[in-house]
Image (tube, grey):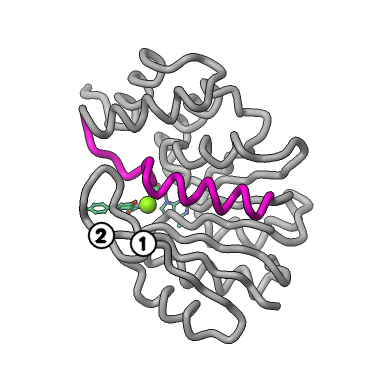
Amino acid sequence: TRSTRPQRMLKAVQKNAIRGNPESVISAIDYFCKHSEWAMNVGDEKGCILDSVVTEVDPSTVLELGTYCGYSTVRIARLLSPGTKFITVEFNPASAEVARKIIAYAGLQDKVTLVEGASGDLIPQIKKLYGITTFDFIFLDHWKDRYLPDIKLFEEYGLLRKGSVLLADNVICPGTPEYLEYVRNSPRYESRYYPSHLEYTKVEDGLEKSLFLG
Ligand SMILES: Cc1ncnc2c1ncn2[C@@H]1O[C@H](/C=C/CNC(=O)c2cc(-c3ccc(F)cc3)cc(O)c2O)C[C@H]1O
Ligand SMILES: [Mg+2]
């Protein structure tokens, strides 16, 4: 049967990247998406903003929602200090399988715990399952209508602390209007928009960074 786009992306990584070299894995995926097939990775332009926020926060605990093929997982994991706890959540088994291989190809498998499942099921169990009390940094890049319910779960289960940083992809395209309205109007967050473009295109998009105030 025909391969899937994630499988073709993995092949491109295995063909064009250097094993154990995260930068080459990132470049190979960006090249594939620019010259072969568009895919919904955060991409190089928004990826640089992601890099700068991760570097600024220098988190000890990280959560990513929506692993997909592991592109942003590799971008984040390559910047983390040793001993950082990094959990990424993906509910599509085929995507998770490709992501595991791409993360391993980059040599970052020991820095990442990839959990297969739906974020709404996992978030209430994170403390019990992974011994994490709060997250310093959260990257939201899963179904756009899940951003708001999941941030409310973070609050309900006490997974945020004063200073926790949430970074949300696609707040313009495809758009996450309810989430934006919430973080921009809630007195518990200080939000800032980072203008950019939809990955590999000239279409407007951007990232919203929200600081939890406690
Ligand atoms: C609730 C939940 N739990 C765990 N994993 C979840 C989940 N919801 C999605 N996921 C997983 O994340 C991935 C999905 C992410 C959703 N991202 C998107 O739908 C998405 C879509 C576009 C886009 C923009 C313009 C266009 F014309 C077309 C597409 C761009 C992006 O950067 C995106 O992240 C894969 C999925 O299995
Ligand atoms: Mg995205």
**Judging from the image, what secondary structure is the residue with disc 2 in?**
strand
For label 1, being within 8 Å of ligand 1 is answered no
Q: If the image is split into quadrants, where does the C terminus sit?
A: bottom right
Q: In which quadrant will I find the N terminus?
A: top left
Residue 100 image position (x, y, % from top left): 52, 30
Q: CA distance from mark 2 to mark 1?
A: 8 Å
Q: Label 1 crowding class (10 Å Cα cut-off): few <14, some 14-19, many 20+?
A: some
Tell me whether circle 2 and circle 1 mark residues in contact (CB < 8 Å).
yes
Q: Which residue is mark 2?
A: 204
Instruction: Of the two numbered discs 2 and 1 on the same chain, state the one appearing first in sequence.
Output: 1
**Residue that appears at 39% across and 46% down:** 42
203 relative position to 23: left or right = left
- Residue at left offset 41%, top offset 80%: 181
Tell me the magenta residue range: 36-58
Task: Choose between 107 and 56: the one closer to the eye.
Answer: 56
Which residue is under mark 1? 195
